[in-house]
Amino acid sequence: MSVKKFLSMTLIVLLLLSLTACNHQMGILNPKGIIASEERKLFFDALALMLIVVIPVIIMSLVFVYHYQVSHRVKDYKPNWSHNLYLEIIWWTIPCIIILVLAIITWKKSHELDPFQPIPAYKEPPMLIQVIALPWKWLFIYPKQNIATVNYLEIPVNQQVEYWFTTDNVPMSSFFVPQLGSQIYTMTGMRTRLHLVAKNIGVYEGMNTQYNGNGFAGMRFQAHVVDPAEMQRWVTKVKASSNHLTNQTYHQLLNPSFSEPPKFFAGTPDDLFNHVFMLYMMNTGPNHPRENTNKFHQE
């Protein structure tokens, strides 16, 4: 087999492998939010820097195999050669410079994209949504609007949204809307935070990326990004509902369920999020705070 044919076949195989998990509607490669766009840029910047080393190494590996094969009997073959000071300086200096540049970029972006910090470009106070991971569903509470939803998120376009996260009666979970931005963990007795801005109107897939039991695969939701006027109409519609999130209803939601359909509630218990957060934070005994509630089964 000729080298040209071998390289062509290798390229085709690599291209096919790169498409096996391709989905143009998912992930940072098709960003629809400010944070996702910055993460995409960081990804390609880091990839380009690493390819400065990777591509020459791959090319030299193939060229050397072809050039020094036994049948060629080349004159520059030196089996006892082992060291060259100038070459050593080159192939140690370049990777060190790349690592230094990557470290600076990563450190800078890690602080700029800190999920706990508001996005500097948006000066208006963010919209607050409190999120509780339940078994195996997501509860979204809009405290200012006094409404709540299960497995359904609606947010306004081009407005910063601040999310608070905690967990109740389920192991650690992970909130992620790939096209909008950062993934973040949710844990009992802790409040994590995330700031996101959606740039485009649309419907985006949200999910749990942390395995937390049998219902993990169905712990998904749709994030609807709409214009502010539509957002207000939706809030008014939900508030007119006769379905209220009472303490009794909330305790029913604590029971494990699979692929829970979206639900909408007008009215929520006072300070529900902080009550759940403090329930676990203040628990110091051997008993689980939800010991009388149906438990998940993690396998």
Image: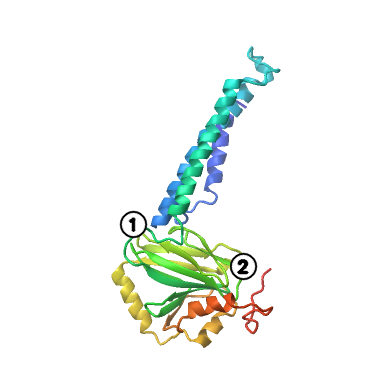
In percent of the image, x 52 and y 83: which residue is there? Answer: 250
Q: Quadrant of the C terminus?
A: bottom right
**Which of the two residues, 263 or 166, is positioned nearer the viewer here?**
166
Residue 17, position as x, y percentages in the image: 56, 45
Q: CA distance from mark 1 to mark 2?
A: 36 Å
Colour basis = rainbow
Residue found at the very far top of the displayed protein: 75
Which of the 4 quarters of the picture holds residue 203?
Answer: bottom left
Sequence order check: which comes first, mark 1 or mark 2? Answer: 1
User: Which labelled disc corresponds to residue 222?
Assistant: none
In percent of the image, x 50 and y 60: which residue is there? Answer: 183
Residue 280, position as x, y percentages in the image: 59, 76
Query: Pointer 2: what residue?
Result: 212
Residue 218, position as x, y percentages in the image: 56, 69
Assess disc 2: are there few (<14), some (14-19) or many (≥20) residues with their C-alpha within 10 Å of its C-alpha: many
Q: Is residue 3 visible?
A: no
Element assignment for label 1: loop
Query: Pointer 1: what residue?
Result: 121
Q: Nearer the viewer, mark 1 or mark 2?
A: 1
In percent of the image, x 41 and y 79: which residue is there? Answer: 147
- Amino acid type shown at disc 1: Ala
Q: Is residue 278 visible?
A: yes
Which of the 4 quarters of the picture holds residue 172?
Answer: bottom right
- Amino acid type shown at disc 2: Asn
**Which of the two residues, 105 or 151, is positioned nearer the viewer here?**
105
User: Do callouts 1 and 2 mark residues in contact (Cβ within 8 Å)?
Assistant: no
Element assignment for label 2: loop
Assess disc 1: are there few (<14), some (14-19) or many (≥20) residues with their C-alpha within 10 Å of its C-alpha: few
Residue 72, position as x, y percentages in the image: 65, 16
Q: Quadrant of the N terminus?
A: top right
In the displayed structure, 56 sits above or below 199; it is above
**Which of the two residues, 211 or 278, is positioned nearer the viewer here?**
278
